[in-house]
Image (cartoon, grey):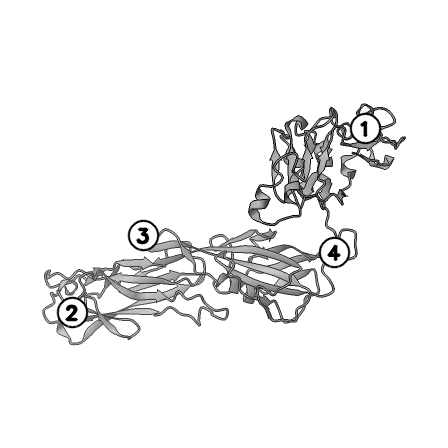
């Protein structure tokens, strides 16, 4: 069997001798009506470039390469010899050819059985494989990927493996000492994704979501992503708004869109596809090649799908902090129409899909006062109690330095928490020792605290492990909703009141009554 390809002069380079590799077409050869007859490549069988002057088939193997008959494909596309199996243009010719053995079966599995054990043991020899290549003539090579949907492929040692293409077989592939080119993978059909779209050149192009453009509010961080990409925004170097809005704007770019189409999305929490329902973006169909994404509804909601991941705690001076990262994914899909508000994951019929990951980096920083003072009040000459209030402030702007913690008489706690992440701030119990008559060191004294005039509690712990007063200041860890604002979701308390009862046996001193304040922060 000799297969000859004849190309007109327009397929050749200017020298008229070498086939232009950029013009090699895709060719599919269908082999039919073999059934149990199998297909054996014999000596002299091969693929050739036919002479443009003579279309006569060679009478025997000595005619191969003779003037007026056929030429070697390898040499015709620029190879060094008839058997040059490494030249990139030779490999490219193989990658553009597919041999489809539509109904060729292994002789020991005909009629075809789909029993796995039967298929695993069929077509293992040159005499039983649906397609075999056991012998060849000098100067000949087989070209193209072998597609054998109902059988096996067998190549023997005497072929030297000289075929330029891949092998796809339903049952078995046997290379019996048949070496292959070190560059063999470059000859597989459609290599480098060059195989053209079946719609190319037709009226109906395939819809594609090409990219998404993302920008922070100050346009200091602009990113354009292909599907599968990750966008990273950092509060430390950007101008992001506090959660939940963020202020990030987005624009989807599409091509080959019809007059109208549906656009749907779903969230992939923490990068894991939850296989949830698809939700329609906006109230109706889309019509353009770009879609503006409403930052206040979609990207902000995307950010709020996940809980922030906390990094290593860091303590310096009067600031306790740890880094935060929120990672969440979203997937878009286009459909033929936008009739349904939601579509189940197993019901949607997509025309294009696109996904990306949004990563937001920030930090939680809490600055705390080092001590508290009740001044030089003569606490033993009155009744009642002295009160000091620790002001609490949650700021929204980027905190670059340690915030003002106030004076010991008017201490302040300042929280920088742009992602509204949950946390718990604890206050250390003061040492309770019978030391002189300082009110801070009298056992059982200074034992009441109050948060916003709420429930009072003891500062002198009755618990065996009571080192910290839990819940002095905390924020809920539940992800915030879209409509949540800083004002709608304040800290559990915006001030801490410490109450010190008056007693007549306090030591009167000209020095202020002060005590150190210890703090602990946990995610």
Going 76% across and 57% down the picture, which residue do you hit?
204
**Residue 131, percent from left and from top:** 68, 38
Viewer can see residue 180: yes
Asked if 109 appears above or below 304 in the picture, the reply is above
**Alpha-carbon neighbours of circle 2 within 10 Å: few (<14), some, or many (≥20)?**
some
**Residue at image mark 4:** 205
**Residue at image mark 3:** 317
**Residue at image mark 1:** 71
Gap between marks 2 and 4 measured at Cα:
88 Å
The quarter in which the N terminus is drawn is top right
Residue ranking furthest to the bottom = 383
Instruction: Give residue 168's quadrant in the image.
Output: top right
**Alpha-carbon neighbours of circle 1 within 10 Å: few (<14), some, or many (≥20)?**
many
Closer to the chain start, of discs 2 and 3, is 3
Near-viewer residue (369 or 417): 417
Gap between marks 2 and 1 measured at Cα:
114 Å
Residue ranking furthest to the right = 53
**Helix, strand or loop for disc 2:** loop
**Helix, strand or loop for disc 1:** strand
Asked if 233 appears above or below 258 in the picture, the reply is above
Near-viewer residue (44 or 370): 44
Near-viewer residue (23 or 176): 176
**Residue 145, percent from left and from top:** 69, 39
**Residue at image mark 2:** 378
């Amino acid at each position: 069997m000799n297969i000859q390809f004849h190309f007109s002069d327009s397929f050749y380079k200017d020298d008229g001798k070498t086939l232009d590799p950029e013009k090699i077409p895709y060719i599919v050869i269908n082999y039919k009506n073999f059934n149990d007859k199998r297909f054996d490549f014999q000596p002299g069988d091969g693929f050739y470039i036919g002479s443009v002057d003579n279309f006569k088939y060679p009478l025997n193997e000595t005619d191969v390469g003779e003037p007026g008959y056929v030429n070697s494909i390898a040499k015709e596309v620029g190879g060094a010899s008839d058997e040059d199996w490494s030249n990139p243009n030779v490999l490219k010719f193989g990658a553009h050819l597919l041999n489809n053995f539509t109904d060729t079966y292994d002789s020991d599995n005909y009629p075809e059985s789909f029993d796995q054990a039967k298929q695993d043991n069929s077509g293992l020899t040159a005499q039983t494989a649906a397609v075999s290549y056991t012998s060849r003539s000098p100067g000949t090579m087989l070209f193209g990927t072998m597609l054998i949907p109902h059988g096996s492929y067998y190549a023997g040692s005497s072929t030297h493996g000289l075929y330029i293409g891949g092998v796809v077989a339903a049952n078995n592939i046997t290379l019996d000492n048949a070496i292959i080119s070190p560059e063999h993978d470059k000859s597989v059909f459609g290599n480098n994704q060059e195989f053209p779209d079946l719609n190319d050149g037709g009226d109906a192009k395939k819809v594609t979501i090409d990219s998404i453009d993302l920008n922070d509010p100050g346009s200091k961080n602009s990113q354009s992503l292909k599907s599968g990409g990750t966008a990273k925004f950092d509060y430390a170097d950007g101008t992001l708004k506090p959660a939940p809005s963020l202020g990030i704007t987005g624009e989807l770019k599409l091509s080959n869109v019809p007059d109208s189409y549906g656009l749907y999305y779903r969230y992939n929490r923490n990068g894991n596809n939850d296989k949830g329902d698809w939700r329609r973006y906006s109230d109706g169909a889309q019509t353009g090649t770009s879609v503006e994404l409403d930052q206040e509804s979609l990207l902000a909601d995307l950010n709020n799908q996940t809980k922030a991941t906390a990094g290593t705690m860091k303590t310096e001076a009067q600031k306790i902090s740890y880094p935060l990262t929120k990672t969440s994914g979203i997937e878009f899909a286009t459909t033929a129409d936008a009739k349904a508000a939601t579509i189940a994951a197993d019901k949607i019929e997509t025309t294009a899909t696109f996904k990306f990951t949004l990563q937001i980096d920030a930090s939680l920083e809490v600055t705390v006062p080092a001590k508290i003072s009740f001044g030089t009040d003569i606490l033993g000459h009155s009744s009642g109690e002295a009160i000091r209030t620790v002001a609490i402030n949650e700021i929204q702007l980027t905190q670059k330095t340690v915030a003002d913690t106030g004076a010991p008489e008017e201490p302040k706690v300042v929280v920088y928490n742009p992602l509204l992440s949950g946390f718990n701030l604890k206050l250390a119990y003061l040492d309770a020792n019978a030391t002189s008559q300082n009110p801070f060191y009298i056992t059982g004294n200074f034992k009441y605290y109050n948060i916003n005039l709420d429930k009072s509690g003891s500062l002198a712990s009755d618990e065996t492990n009571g080192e910290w007063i839990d819940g002095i200041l905390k924020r809920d860890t539940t992800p915030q909703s879209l409509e949540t604002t800083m004002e709608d979701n304040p800290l559990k308390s915006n001030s801490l009141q410490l109450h010190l009862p008056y007693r007549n046996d306090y030591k009167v001193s000209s020095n202020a009554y002060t005590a150190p304040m210890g703090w602990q922060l946990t995610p």
